[in-house]
Image (cartoon, helix red, strand yellow):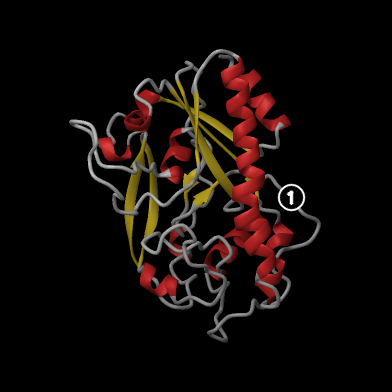
Amino acid sequence: MDRSELSDFAKGAGADVFGVADIGRFDELPPEKHPQTIFPETRSVIVLGRRITRGTLRGVEEGTNFTDYAFYGCHWLDDRFVAMTTYRVAEFIEDAGWEAVPLPNLPPEVPPMGVTVRKNQPPPNVMLDFDDAAVRAGIGEIGYCGVLLTPRFGPRQRIQIILTDAEIEPSPILDEPIDPRSDQSKDLCPLGAFIGEKELSICGKAMTVAEIDYRKCADCKNGAMPNRHHPAGKPDRLAAVCVRTCMDYLERNGRLENKFSAKFRKRDPWTVKENIDFYKA
């Protein structure tokens, strides 16, 4: 299957981000995290998604409306808009004679919810790490804040996955770093949830990310939301003040392709801790 043709169809179906990884890029992963555990004939892993509009974050930034993000940045966006795009692309692949397995973005850290039903297989449900897969598909990188960043939108997207037995030319791994400022990102959390840092390497791409105390994130009132799928899942931090500050920094320094006529942060953001200097770095 031609990657350009598939990409064009996905964009026509609403996809703002799109990338493909061949199955060889997942070789080092254990069975409980491997795409072929779900679909043994997988040859290609497609990662696609839609943007979170910047205005969806405005009410959280001002501390006046959190519901807008809950719907247009989370529930409706993931469950309806992205899901419909994913399903249409899966239909396109199957109309071409290849099998397509659409996967929703569920928390990979959730413990197994069943017992092994086939010999030498992990127990269900097997859940992939979508941010990890996105790096393997050339969509972006894991930023210091621990969320997926893309060159166009920074942290502003929701993604889903399609597994297929079609052989598709993989997208190149992203070379140029999006967020080069790890030393300046350590104080972005007003609750002190960034407790250290670690090095990640995915398909040869090295990234420095924060070690995060997610128990503090669970108590965050600055835009973080509980994981809506499972209490063991990591909190949703895409609207949290740490990630919004990261996005604003990337915009101000010309690191993102999605440009705006006005800066995102026009005044000090509302936060449970006053007088934090978000630009101290």
In the rendered image, which quarter is residue 73 located in?
A: bottom right
Residue 253 visible, this angle: no
Which percent across, then down, holds residue 60?
A: 65, 71
Residue at 37% over, 72% down: 215
**The disc labelled 1 sits on which kind of residue?**
Lys
Which percent across, then down, holds residue 154?
A: 59, 51
Image height of 13 relative to 210, above or below: above
Residue at 81% over, 56% down: 261
Q: Seen from this angle, which residue lies furthest right?
A: 261
Q: Seen from this angle, which residue lies furthest bottom?
A: 274
Q: Which residue is mark 1?
A: 259
Which percent across, then down, holds residue 30?
A: 25, 37
Image height of 46 relative to 268, above or below: above
Residue at 52% over, 69% down: 224
Residue 209 visible, this angle: yes
Instruction: Name the element at disc 1.
Output: loop
Front-most of residues 36 and 20: 36
Which percent across, then down, holds residue 269?
A: 64, 76
Image position of 162 (left or right of 66):
left
The quadrant of the rendering that contains the N terminus is top right
Mark 1 surroundings: few (<14), some (14-19) or many (≥20) residues within 10 A? few
Number of marks present in the image shown: 1
In the rendered image, which quarter is residue 245 located in?
A: bottom right
